[in-house]
Image (tube, coloured by chain):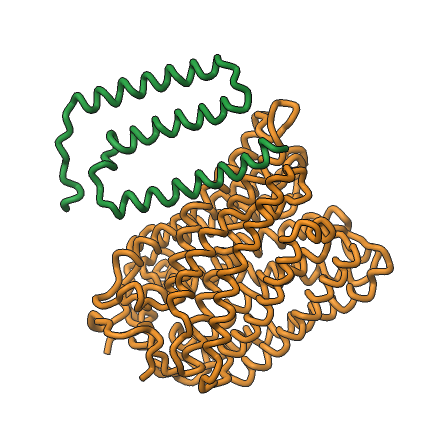
Amino acid sequence: MEENASHHVATKTFVFVWIALLCLTGLTIKAAQMQMGEWSMVANIAIASVKASLVLWFFMHLKYEKRLFKLLLFVPIMTISIIIVLTFFDIWYR
Amino acid sequence: MEASFYHAKTRYPGIFGWIFTTDHKRVGLLYLFSTLSFFAVGVSLGLTMRLELIRSGMHFYSAQTYNAIFTLHGVIMIFLFIIPGIPSSLGNFIMPLQIGARDVAFPKINILSWGLFIMGGAIAVTSLFTGGGPPDTGWTFYVPYSIRTGTNISLAVFGVFLIGLSSTLTGMNFLTTIHRLRAPGMTWKRMTLFTWSIYATSWIQLLATPVLAITLLLIIIERNFGVGFFDPAKGGDPILFEHMFWIYSHPAVYIMILPAMGTVTDIIPVFTRRNIFGYSFIAASSLAIAFVGYLVWGHHMFTSGMSDTARIIFSLLTFIVAVPSGIKVFNWIASLYKGSIRMNAPLLYTLAFIFLFSIGGLTGLVQGALATAVHVHGTYFIVGHFHYVMFGGAGFGFFAGLHYWFPKITGKLYEEHLAKLACFFLFIGFNMLYFSMFVLGWEGMPRRYYDYLPRFNGPNLVATIGSWILAMGLIIMFYNLIHSLFAGNKAGDNPWEAASLEWQTTSPPPVENFATQPVVTKGPYEFR
């Protein structure tokens, strides 16, 4: 099947992504030390989302998938994101 | 002509030909038999509760037993009957036939789902007789009580976890089936609206159920290892549990009701002999309900101590979900208008469904509005409301579907007058039982209580008498169906003269559904 065909991705792309992930991990540690109060949660979720996106996009080859598969993944992620935001309307304003 | 799937040779003999089957029709019937067995237990428990509540005071059993019984009633009815009720039984049997597929996409996962469902049910039942005794938390397993009670919560919760896994697998299976296995010519706009509703339901099953799984595991971890996810003394938050529980359990309400809506949408055109009014809007409203249904869970928590901002937002969102439900109701009514109505049992159950669901839906708005919700929260008004939606809606929709597809499933016809008589009893008993609860709730009788003040005696007596009439209706209905299974007249392939694909094969269908690959050239409700 064509979608199973391997895409040749340059090794340096993977290395760049790996370095980016390491930097973001460092950023998570830095953010934890910054005493941002309620905003530390936002910072943590934002960094984790970027990391997860990098893994999905490059390591799991989402970049090379058909548009339908991207859409099928995007809709649930958006739904979960909205659910998390709605939960914060309680926690932040309580 | 090929032999029906009942008579076809199976890989294993006898009962094992059923338990290890991969035929979607056999799996559907396994689900049907199991869910109806659980339903019978749930009804019996409900009847004993109504008997206990016939007058104020203690009559038959203790308060602790009452707590255990209403918990069990809720867990059985929600997790073992209504959630798998239509999608896993009728959906399994009918949906692949309707899209012209030979089976579901993953037949082995299909039978695995049933196995997990039965294992989960067995574990939940085992929890009654082992450990610290029957769980007494209500079906919602709210913390902190579910963390502190000495009853056997962990095992019951693990049973529900397995049932959830079964539900997720079924959702994934059906989604793949509908995307990949439609017959040539079966475009999205030629699918029946039942299949559309199963499609929307499957998305909810796939995406919402894992949230429940996580929540239940957190209870087990907190009970066994003392981790304080929900304990404020350890930095946790008890309201977080309610959020996580309802993030699943509100969409689960739509897992229950959407397939029932799909069922009646299939029935109406057949018994009015005209095309459904507003096909695209009904299909889109199923998806809209599935999506918006994710965003309204907070209305279960208006008095839990959630922030005012969140309460206002959830109240607003709750009103939005009424719009697609309203679209469906108006389209059903418009489809009946000027139709050549044949008042057969399936349509009678459908009309009862529309009436009862409308009352359930409208009383839902009373609770969606913040001010009135605070007044009726935690009262019998809620109990009345959700029984109107769950039993009057999902239950009557299920009965309608059972009568509509009975000739397809069994090849037999039931006694029409007995089916109508049963519907009459069910309708009268239902309204006596549950409308009384609206009155009681409005007057302030709290739900889940073992006893009540003598001033609530009147409506409670009416409700209990209603429960007997309702039970009578159920007995007549199931007597009729079971008796017809053995002694009914032959139905023929298409007794209702329906146009959708499942009726274009033999009744009961052969093993791989169609003698030749069907090619679809028209919509499911075009009779001319």
- Residue placed at 40% from the left, 75% from the top? B276
Q: Is residue B224 visible?
A: yes
Q: Is residue B218 left or right of residue B195?
A: right
Residue A25 shown left or right of residue A69 in the figure: right
Chain A painted colour: green
* Relative image position of residue B226 (x, y in whole percent): 59, 25
Relative height, residue B508 to residue A28 (above, below): below
What is the number of callouts on the image?
Answer: 0
Picture quarter containing residue A5?
top left
Quadrant placement of the C terminus of chain B: bottom left
**Where is the N terminus of chain B found, in terms of image quarters?**
bottom left
- Visible in this render: residue B66? no
Q: Quadrant of residue B479?
A: bottom right
Residue A74 vertical position relative to residue B25 in the rendered view, above or below: above
Residue B162: x %, y % from top left: 47, 44
Residue A16 locus on image (x, y percent): 23, 20
Q: Nearer the viewer, residue B257 or B328?
A: B328
Q: Of B1 and B192, which appears nearest the observer?
A: B192
Q: Residue at x 35, y 19 (%)?
A: A24
Q: Is residue B187 left or right of residue B140?
A: left
- Coordinates of residue B271 in the picture (x, y in percent): 44, 81
Q: Residue furthest right?
A: B454
Q: Residue at x 62, y 47 (%)?
A: B300
Q: Is residue B169 above or below residue B39?
A: above
> B29 or B398, which is in the foreground?
B398
Identify by letter the chain in orange: B
